[in-house]
Image (cartoon, rainbow, N blue to C red):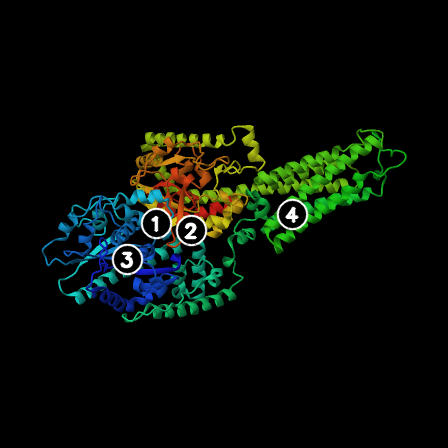
Amino acid sequence: MFSIGKMHIFVTRLHPSQQNEVSGDVVQEADPFPELLHHSIHQIQSSESKSVFKIYPEATYLDMDCVPGSFAGESRVSKAKYLRNSSIFVPIITWGRDHSVLNELARINEESDVESDFVVYALVAIYLLHNSVGRLKTVFSILQDESGGQCSMMDACRQLSKKPSLLSCERACSLLQQGGVRKERERILEFLLKISVQDAVLLLLPAGWCEEAPMVGGNKGTCAMYVMPDGEVEKGAVEAAELITDCLVSIVNKHIERKLWEFSNHNPRGIEVLQVLRELGVHEQFNEYFALRGIESFERLSSLGHNVSLKKECNVVFRSCDEVVTVMSRHDEDSIKTLQMLASEHKRDKRFRPLNERLRQYRDTDVNGVLALRTSNSLETALVKLPARVCITFLSTVYLVFGIKQLMSVWTESIWLPEANSTTPVEPRTVKISVIADPIISFYWSFLFLSGIVIGIVNTPLRAKWLLLFTGHLVIVGNLFCALSDFVQCSTQGTGIGSYCSGTSHIVTVIFVAFAMYLAHFVQHYFWIAAFFLQGAFCLFSFVDIEGWFRMLFLALGLGCFVVAFIIVLQFRKQYRKTFMELTAAMKSFDESWETVREQNTQAIEEINQRVRSISQELNEVIKGGTKTWTLYLSVMLGMRRSRYSSRNDKIRQESSDFERLFLQAQEISAQFQLWVSSWNQVGRVEHGNVKSCSRAMQKTVRSYQRDPSCLTDLVRCTVVVQSIDEVLAWVTFLREQSVVGFEVNGRDKPGSSRVTSEDIEAGRDAMRGDIFMSITSIKNRYDPSYKASISGGYRDLCVCVEVGWTRDEMNQTCSLVPVREWGQTAGLRKHICEIQVGEELGTVLLEEMHAIKKLLHKEYVNFRNTLCQ
């Protein structure tokens, strides 16, 4: 028995059985047409073998009869499950004689129901085509009148039962499941039982061929037919084979075109591989090879299986599939050897590394050194640039000076524990532990900060950031230890706690450092400014508190810290203003267009604001519901439940926080999402967008999201471009009808336990299927006149994030969107937040004129984005 997922058959033919399906009687006369058609298909397609065979990596055969002998051991009807692995289904429909197909089917009715091979095959094919399951794309029916013109096909079809064949439906359902259809048996049967015996025949014919053809939702594949000429079997076989070949070539070309489109636009790692192939000069040689096999990295080459040459006695054919497969296998092996050699030569290229590893090692070299000190991840981003390293060196020098001053105290009277309110040592003299610990803390503080620079250079900025954070926490622990030891020693070994014997100075240090660490973890925009201001203030405090020549040194260090802080602020403002003014000048026409639109559409803009606010309020209610009790709040805060809402970034995150997995999801759903939006969008036009590049996604993750990849909700995005504000309003209205808000986004939510009710889900309807498929997770209205356009570089648009769920057909490498109401009951469901968008970064609905201007200003916007380190 063959593994269903390990083979592909381009043509599956179903000829009339040599046995009466109802009575079981054997028909004696042999029909030469099957062998003639098989031979003709092979003879014609042998010239197309190279282009045909290359599209699938597994064992591939032109015709069902070419499959090896062990496959032939299956019964005729059981082979229907392989239709899922076929491109074209060719049923031969005959009528006019007792053993003809339609005449035998006419004997099936409710009182005399039997399992019919033809009906089973027809039901399987109709289900696969209607539900877009598997690789079946076309039904090519061959019609043969055996009545000598005495009976038309429609007259024969009218004799067929208008009720379903229960036995055939049950067998077709079993074969569909054996073939890999992952649906409940009851749901498959529900579909099949709607198809009568008559419908099973008519649905295999081209749409509109007759008025009596049923409409079971309409077939999504294509149907064609050929009428056999009377008495000219050989001629008919050749003509039919030529038409079948034309259909097959068309299917193959569409498949290649689709795969190349997906690979070059919706597979970010594939795009990088194609980039490498261009650099190596082998793009034309291998781009189709990579796209058709989904090879997005050279790492997958070693795991690729080759087409296995399987022996079969097929003497009637001009050139056997075995020969073709063997030739293609040799070609594949040569290609893989060449590619593996190239991969070995370029193994250090970062584009070939796993994405999670690349993210860990990421260096943001595009950012301005001074401006990097104001990013939301400034501890890491700035470490790759000289200004931050100078700042760290300066701070290390300050700590070193403090350490030297504290070390000198060890050889003075300060080493002894003083009385409560004087500098006189207590008797018997006792060493004050904090005096010994202070220089140690200052020295390792200075040393570890300098080590952070070294690690950032020789290793990764991420590890350098971890070291700096670890150092800060270690300083807090050290000073807490010193404060505690002072309190204990003054209370137990001294004369009590007083102005000269207490841990107050260490508590002050802890407060200063703890505040800086809070900024380092949660508000890094201001960390470097605050660090230098706090350090400067502490230096001035030391200047006032101590005597000797160290006073002037601390004064100089304190003033130096203030100067550095002011330089960071002033330089950022200067660079920001310069870049924004350049962008503003370039976007003058954009602003003029917007002012004209705003003046002419005041009422429509206000209605858009109201609708968007309504959606936002619903989202806020859902988000608040996740922490509406202390128990829920604490469970999220303690990590017992992961809240999908990020308060730091004010957004609902992806379910997964794995960078590699997010890109795999984006790669799977991007093309399907773009086509799906195009299918239901009724306002404006949809422009398909590429998946966000790996490099930009890593940059944004590090700069804006503190290395939390789950905040990347714009990996998959598309564009809706409209002509007027009224169309924007119509689009928002239609979107709300087609969606629910915040379905299952809380940390406490289990499948099916969302606050969104079934009534909410039924409120939205897909025009074709009566279901809704998306849940709104974010909406931003930049058409609001109160919105500060400077935040987004002057852009005004409408940004919507929606979550969709789908299942993956691994054999066919296709996705099927799942209605929201079925998310909780669907096995293998995958979910991803996508953006319906216009623009470089943000999902939007944008006016046509503004969209054209925005394309021209992309370079200026990128400069602005880098200035803000977004």
Q: CA distance from mark 2 to mark 3?
A: 28 Å
Q: Earlier in the sequence, mark 3 or mark 4?
A: 3
Q: Earlier in the sequence, mark 4 or mark 1?
A: 1
Query: For the residue carrying disc 4, how many other residues have a C-alpha within 10 Å: few (<14), some (14-19), or many (20+)?
Result: some
Q: Earlier in the sequence, mark 2 or mark 4?
A: 4
Q: Earlier in the sequence, mark 2 or mark 3?
A: 3
Q: Which residue is mark 2?
A: 667
Relative to 455, 161 lies left or right = left
Q: Which residue is mark 1?
A: 174
Query: For the residue carrying disc 1, how many other residues have a C-alpha within 10 Å: few (<14), some (14-19), or many (20+)?
Result: some
The quarter holding residue 751 reads top left
Q: Which residue is mark 3?
A: 88
User: What element does badge 2 sit on?
Assistant: helix
Q: Is residue 428 something that shows in the picture?
A: yes
Relative to 561, 3 lies left or right = left
The quarter holding residue 441 reads top right
